[in-house]
Image (tube, rainbow, N blue to C red):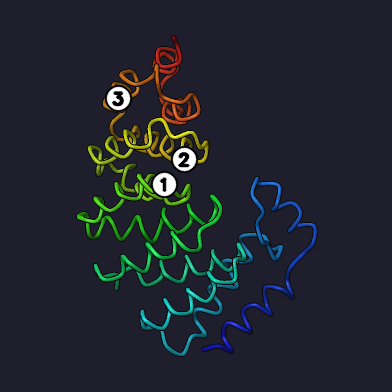
Amino acid sequence: MDTIIEDLRFELKHNADEKTRISGERFFREEVKIHGLKSALVSSIGREYFKKLPEKNKETVFGLCEELWKSGYLEESFIACNWAYCLRKEFTPDDFPVFEGWVSKYVSNWASCDTLCNHSIGTFVEMYPSFVSDLKKWARSEKRWVKRASAVTLIIPARSGKFLGDIFEIADILHSDPDDMVQKGYGWMLKAASEAHQQKVFRYVMRRKKSMPRTSLRYAIEKMPSELKAQAMSR
């Protein structure tokens, strides 16, 4: 299995482009490690190597994902996220500590956070809703990406109307967080929830608009009609 990772990394480096690397770095304020490949090519290479894996049992694949996370490279984190998602039908409650460990130990930027949480962890929580209580614990973390993860994990379920009460609870916990990446994360979660529950989210925002950070507020109302936006933005 080590050779698979070595070959995969060789492929990434071989296809890396300095211009793409420099361009990619502009999307981040924090320092990021980037090989320098466009996301479509990363996805293609990841799929190709997943097919080559001689064993696709969860223990083996998650172990390989861990190795990819450890590198710190953005593209390798994307492949780790995608490989984990490929096994979503096999997720069990015992997988939560693995996901929690990846968020806590390895996630160091918004792109890795959102890719992991929107898909693998979001799917996991839909399968096992009792774990939404753990997201509320994440929201109280001292780590910015764990806090953001508590919100962005619920983006896709929120769009179909799920977990609304929990979404409001998480938004309340994160309400006054000074970190704009956390503010954007929970604002995005509220925006997603507004697709199915526009009036309820609007009422929630209106009750809190005087103290809600403007960044979160703008994200939350982004998909609402102009008249509702105007009411929410007025002082």
According to the picture, the residue beneath numbered tag 1 turns out to be 147
21 vs 177: above or below: below
Q: Where is residue 187 in the image (x, y as percent from the top left)?
A: 43, 34
Q: Which of 155 and 68 is in front in this view?
A: 68
At 28% from the left and 53% from the top, the residue drawn is 134
Q: Circle 2: is it few (<14), some (14-19), or many (20+) Cα within 10 Å?
A: many
Kind of element beneath mark 3: helix
Q: Where is residue 181 in the image (x, y as percent from the top left)?
A: 51, 40
Disc on the earlier residue, 2 or 1: 1
At 38% from the left and 64% from the top, the residue drawn is 99
Disc on the earlier residue, 3 or 2: 2
Q: Circle 3: is it few (<14), some (14-19), or many (20+) Cα within 10 Å?
A: some
Q: Which residue lies furthest to the top in this view?
A: 235
Kindly indicate whether the residue at mark 1 contacts the one at mark 2 (C-beta within 8 angstroms): yes
Q: In 3D space, how far apart are the residues under numbered discs 3 and 2 (Cα atoms)?
A: 18 Å
Q: Residue furthest right?
A: 19
Disc on the earlier residue, 3 or 1: 1
Q: In 3D space, how far apart are the residues under numbered discs 2 and 1 (Cα atoms)?
A: 6 Å
Kindly indicate whether the residue at mark 2 contacts the one at mark 3 (C-beta within 8 angstroms): no
Q: What's the residue type where badge 1 is placed?
A: Lys
Q: Position of residue 108 (x, y in %)?
A: 55, 56
Q: Which of 107 and 41 is in front in this view?
A: 107
Left or right, 233 with reference to 122: right
Of discs 3 and 2, which sits in the foreground?
2
Kind of element beneath mark 1: helix
Q: Circle 1: is it few (<14), some (14-19), or many (20+) Cα within 10 Å?
A: many
Quarter of the figure with the C terminus: top left
Kind of element beneath mark 2: helix
**Numbered label attached to residue 204:** 3
Left or right, 222 with reference to 205: right
Left or right, 192 with reference to 25: left
According to the picture, the residue beneath numbered tag 2 turns out to be 182
